[in-house]
Structure formats: structure tokens, C-alpha cells
Amino acid sequence: MTNKRSLERRSCTEYFDAAVLDAFPKKRTSVRILDAGAGQGSTASYLRSLGYNNIDALTVSKERLDRAEASGLYRNLLYTALKAESTLCATGAFDAMICADGVFPDEVDPDAMDEMLRLVKPGGIVCFTMNAAQFDSAHNSFRLKCEDFISKRKWKLISQGITSQPQDSEKDNNNHQCAERNSSDSYVLVFVVIDNY
């Protein structure tokens, strides 16, 4: 059976790829990508198999940073938390950002969303996964932050799907939004940045 994390990464990467190709046609090899929460390079490996090769890693874990470096899949390594202007990268430094291992409310501050927005240039893509039950919670600060960015025209939701344990291989993730979810389902959320200032 497919590992849940592996399924999330693969699904997130597929949504990400579709959005990036729409935003940057014919530029796959030069699109500058930040892999936020990079680990041993699984997401970067998927991205490289699709033709992307300008990928930077960001993580708060020294162990993960060492694994990312050892993988040889990344151009630059950033050892820092994803929070308000903590990365020391210029505003709009990246064409796209992916966080395929998920945004975990217990581990990541909602203000990380501000930094995600700041780092990606207008017209660029932000893609991440989050546990669906947590995201749908009435008081989820990440969902509220996403809605705030949408209402302020900072970014626009362009794609959303659900990763679940495989049950019916013929179902399309886009049609899962109304299906019942279990506690291990995750959303894949894809935004295009409108204004990062």
C-alpha cells in the first residue's frame, strides 16, 4: 500500500506542476522553486523527474538540511523557519513555492503564510497540503489567513484537491471535495500570487 506521505507529495507535485506550467509555459527548467519543509529530497526528486532543476530547500531541522544537501537535488539550502521575513531572501525571490509534506498547525505558525506570500513573485504559485479536518475547522487560523489573502486580493485559489488513502483509482481528486473525508485526508491547495507587498 502506498505510504500516505508519499501519496501527498506525489499529488501535491502533480497539482503544482499543472499550475506552474500554466503560469510559466515552456520555462520548466528555469522556474525558481522553494521546497519549504524539505526533507530527504522526495519532493525535489519528483520535481526533477518532471524537468525542474532550479530548486532551493528550506527547513528548520539540521538533520533534514543535511539529508537535503546529501541528496544533491537542491541548488541552495536555507536553514531557517518560515516566518515573517526570516529567510533573508528578497521579496518575490521565487517563481513558485511547494510545501508537499504539509503545513502542520502544531509545528508552523500561521504567520508563515505571510512569508510564503512575500517570497513568491506576483503571478507565481504557492502550493501546500494540510489535513482537511484541521483546515475545515471553524477556528483554523491557516484557513482564515488564506481567506483573508483572497479577500484582500493577495492571492487567488486556482486549484484544490484531496489526497486520501487509495480506494478507487478511477476517481478524480477534483471530484472528492463533496465526498466524506476521514481524519487522514489532506487538501492540496494551489494559489496564484496577485500582490505580495
Image: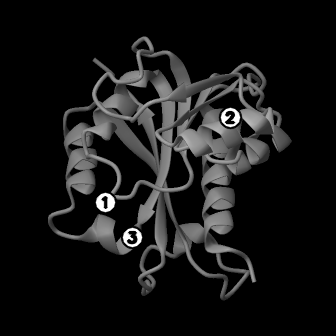
Residue 30 point in image, percent of width and height = 73, 19
- Count neighbours of disc 2 (C-alpha within 10 A) and say few if under 14, some if 14 to 19, many if 20 or more: few
Foreground mark, 3 or 2?
3
Name the amino acid, label 1: Asp
Q: CA distance from mark 3 to mark 2?
A: 26 Å
Residue 42 point in image, percent of width and height = 72, 51
In this view of the protein, which residue sits in the foreground, 81 or 17? Answer: 81
Q: Residue furthest left?
A: 139
For marks 2 and 1 on the same chain, the one whose residue lies earlier in the sequence: 2
SS state under label 3? helix
Identify the image quadrant of residue 66: top right
Residue 106 is marked as 1
Q: CA distance from mark 3 to mark 1?
A: 15 Å
Name the amino acid, label 3: Ala
Marks 3 & 2, CB-CB < 8 Å contact: no
SS state under label 2? helix
Residue at (76, 48) in percent of width and height: 46
In this view of the protein, which residue sits in the foreground, 77 or 142? Answer: 77
Can you say whether 49 is above or below 94 in the image? below
Foreground mark, 2 or 1?
1
Left or right of 143 in this view: 82: right
User: How many numbered circles does the render carry?
Assistant: 3
Can you say whether 4 is above or below 130 in the image? below
Marks 2 & 1, CB-CB < 8 Å contact: no
Q: Quadrant of the N terminus?
A: bottom right
Residue 132 is marked as 3
Residue at (34, 74) in percent of width and height: 133
Circle 2 residue: 21
Q: Quadrant of the C terminus?
A: top left
